[in-house]
């Protein structure tokens, strides 16, 4: 009698992936349980002083989260902030329900414009899509690198290493003894933060929802390679296009035929390079990652790049904040067909 192979431990439980179904292609499908999780948010839970219309609406949707809601029902809510919260949530719900998968809903938002959709909802979609995409992945560096897609990072230079720590975690200021990294980041009191390494990688899954492990993004080290792997999987999962992504240490003598800024600063720097403007020392220091992306199938690419690679630029702000925009990979690459696999 043989024993079953051990299954990878679950990670990112907070994204709610266990509440979702999957279609035949592996895409995420909204369920009543997933929709109810939004109804449980404090912004939508009526306070004791809420009007009867708001309380009734909340109760009705808890019983049937797919129930159509008329604009007049929302307009009848007395509190203007509550009205706005319900408008935003129901518009988002309807988008999830009118698309075959959450991946398709995310793509439609990125292509058609997010409008008034709260950034929180967008980041939650990215979070759960990445969790689906990385199912079965046991590389802690790849999982930690994926956090950059949906959580802002604080960047610091420590003993020659370029480290990314979760910005919200840094700001939480929970009482605990100082670590050298926390002291370097200028905090007097904070939760413990460790730099992810081969030595402690086995702890990542258990700590994954705490976001308390920093990632080393120094050139030629594992962090940038892991981020390149996440980018590769993201493009394949959402655009059904196979690519190879390679971290670079510098952009020398390269024809910048096409580039994608992976954040606002990366786009700004790419624009300057496109115009052949020199970069000063301070701007060069903002570049966190430079990648070369090549397509495996030339037929999937438009004629605009004529077989040339695409360069990806990731950069922090002058205040050392890193806010990646993964949607730029979906809207900025010169591909012919941009439909998801799922």
Image: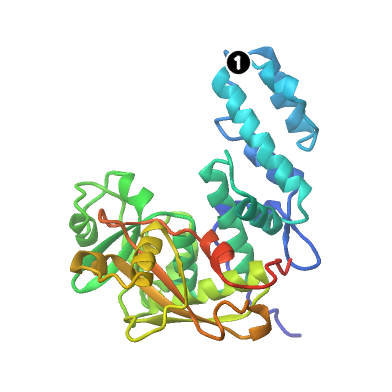
Question: In this orientation, which residue lies closer to the viewer: 296 or 74?
Answer: 296
Query: In the picture, which quadrant includes the C terminus?
Result: bottom right
Locate residue 281, reporting x and y percent: 19, 69
**At x 58% / y 73%, what residue is drawn?**
233
Is residue 297 visible in the rendered structure shown here?
Answer: no
Query: Which of the 4 image quadrants contains residue 300?
Result: bottom right
**At x 74% / y 56%, what residue is drawn?**
101
**At x 77% / y 28%, what residue is drawn?**
69
Q: How many marks?
A: 1
Is residue 100 visible in the rendered structure shown here?
Answer: yes
**At x 68% / y 37%, what residue is drawn?**
91
Query: Which of the 4 image quadrants contains residue 324?
Result: bottom left
Query: In the picture, which quadrant includes the N terminus?
Result: bottom right
Locate residue 176, reporting x and y percent: 26, 48
Position of residue 312 in the picture relative to residue 90 (left or right): left
Question: In this orientation, which residue lies closer to the viewer: 186 or 256?
Answer: 256
Locate residue 89, reporting x and y percent: 64, 36
Give the crowd class for mark 1: few <14, some 14-19, many >=20 residues within 10 Å: some
Q: Is residue 212 above or below residue 136?
A: above
Q: Is residue 302 above or below residue 152?
A: below
Q: Is residue 83 above or below residue 137?
A: above
Locate residue 322, reporting x and y percent: 36, 58
Query: Which of the 4 image quadrants contains residue 232?
Result: bottom right
Question: In this orientation, which residue lies closer to the viewer: 143 or 72?
Answer: 72
Position of residue 117 in the picture relative to residue 104 (left or right): left
Q: Which residue is mark 1?
A: 50
Label 1: which secondary element: loop
């Amino acid at each position: 009698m043989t024993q079953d192979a051990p299954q990878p431990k679950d990670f990112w439980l907070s994204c709610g992936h266990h509440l979702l179904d999957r279609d035949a292609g592996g895409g995420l499908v909204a369920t009543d349980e997933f929709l109810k999780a939004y109804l449980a948010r404090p912004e939508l839970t009526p306070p004791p002083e809420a009007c009867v219309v708001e309380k009734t609406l909340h109760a009705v949707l808890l019983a049937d989260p797919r129930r159509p809601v008329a604009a007049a029902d929302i307009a009848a809510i007395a509190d203007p902030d509550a009205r706005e919260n319900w408008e935003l949530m129901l518009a988002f719900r309807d988008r999830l329900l009118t698309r075959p998968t959450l991946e398709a809903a995310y793509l439609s938002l990125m292509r058609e414009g997010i409008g008034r959709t709260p950034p929180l909802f967008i980041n939650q979609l990215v979070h759960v899509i990445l969790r689906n995409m990385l199912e079965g992945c046991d590389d802690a560096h790849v999982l930690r690198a994926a956090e950059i897609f949906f959580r802002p990072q604080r960047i610091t230079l420590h003993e020659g290493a370029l480290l990314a720590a979760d910005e919200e975690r840094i700001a939480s200021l929970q009482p605990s003894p100082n670590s050298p990294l926390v002291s370097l980041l200028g905090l007097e009191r904070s939760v413990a933060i460790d730099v992810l390494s081969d030595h402690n990688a086995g702890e990542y899954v258990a700590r994954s929802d705490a976001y308390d492990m920093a990632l080393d993004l120094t050139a030629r080290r594992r962090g940038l390679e892991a981020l390149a792997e996440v980018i590769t999987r993201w493009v394949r999962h959402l655009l059904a296009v196979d690519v190879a992504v390679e971290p670079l240490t510098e952009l020398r003598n390269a024809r910048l035929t096409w580039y994608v800024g992976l954040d606002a600063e990366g786009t700004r720097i790419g624009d300057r390079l496109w115009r052949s403007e020199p970069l000063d020392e301070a701007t060069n220091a903002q570049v966190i990652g430079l990648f070369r992306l090549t397509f495996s199938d030339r037929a999937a690419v438009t004629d605009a790049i004529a077989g040339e690679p695409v360069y990806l630029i990731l950069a922090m702000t002058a205040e050392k904040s890193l806010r990646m925009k993964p949607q730029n990979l979906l809207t900025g690459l010169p591909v012919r067909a941009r439909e998801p696999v799922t």
